[in-house]
Image (cartoon, rainbow, N blue to C red):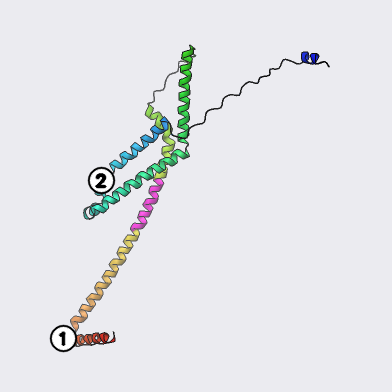
Amino acid sequence: MPESIMAAEMPNAPLDRSPSPASAPPVASAPGPRAAALQKLYNDAINHVLKTCSYDNFAKCFPTPSREVPQSMRQLHEQFNEKLGNQLRSNFEDVLRDRNVVPSLNELDRLVEEAKRRKTRAQEEGVESSPMPNLRPHTLPAAQLYLAHLSPSLAQASQDIQQQQEVTQAENSELLDRVLQQRSEIATLVQGLENVVADLDASVATLKPEELDALREEGRDVDEEMRMVT
């Protein structure tokens, strides 16, 4: 078949393919404005908690050690605050990582900035936005909406902290039982020693003076023999 006839029978197919939609830019792993604000808010809350746990409040829980060894109690208070702050920050970092919070907030920042750029570009090009339906805006405050989004993460963090507190309380109860048992054993031992001393005193009281002198003389002889041997 001649090439001219084949060209006439074939439809005019477009040579250029439609361009594929542009892929979304990668989400930055570094904290954006919202993620940084969330981290700052939590750090401020931790600092407030640690300031509330001042040395004066801490010392009221342990009046006797605070009066007897104040320097050691101050060191213990500093170590307690440092460990508590590190534990709270570590738990918060675990929640951020497990819930993928930072990338999600960064993606929200990107979408908001993209929407602002599109709106600005449309205004510069004179394109009027489509009329929005008459929707009634919600009346919820920003804090309530913010907490509604964070409630699952906060609930999980609260559950983890409660489990740690239960474990710590169980360990403290076991330690208290051990201390009480040791005190009982010490009291029994002291009572036994007091009984032995009382028996010795009673035995000495029943001895006659000449018997006491004989015992002293025998003790001196034994001491002399031991010195000669050594």
Residue count near mark 2 (Cα–Cα under 10 Å), binned few <14, some 14–19, many ≥20 = few
Amino acid type, mark 2 = Asn
Residue at horizontal 21 percent and vertical 81 percent from the top: 203
Give the main secondary structure, helix, strand or loop, of the magenta stretch: helix
Q: Quadrant of residue 19?
A: top right
Would you say residue 175 sits in the magenta stretch?
yes
First in residue order: circle 2 vs circle 1: 2
Residue count near mark 1 (Cα–Cα under 10 Å), binned few <14, some 14–19, many ≥20 = few
Residue receiving disc 2: 57
In the image, is residue 194 above or below residue 71? below
For this rendering, which residue is in front, 159 or 89? 89
In the image, is residue 28 above or below residue 182? above
| Closer to the eye: label 2 or 1 | 2
Q: Which structural element holds mark 1?
A: helix
82 relative to 110 in the view: left or right = left
Using the rendered image of the protein, determine whether residue 57 is visible from the camera's viewpoint.
yes
For the C terminus, the quadrant is: bottom left
Q: x and y percent of residue 78 in the render? A: 30, 48
Q: x and y percent of residue 10 in the render? A: 76, 16
Residue at horizontal 29 percent and vertical 68 percent from the top: 188
Residue at horizontal 38 percent and vertical 43 percent from the top: 88
In the image, is residue 210 above or below residue 35? below
Residue receiving disc 1: 209
For the N terminus, the quadrant is: top right
For this rendering, which residue is in front, 203 or 79? 79
Q: x and y percent of residue 224 in the render? A: 23, 86
Using the rendered image of the protein, determine whether residue 131 is visible from the camera's viewpoint.
no
Amino acid type, mark 1 = Pro
Q: Write the start and end of the magenta stretch as one range.
A: 162-176
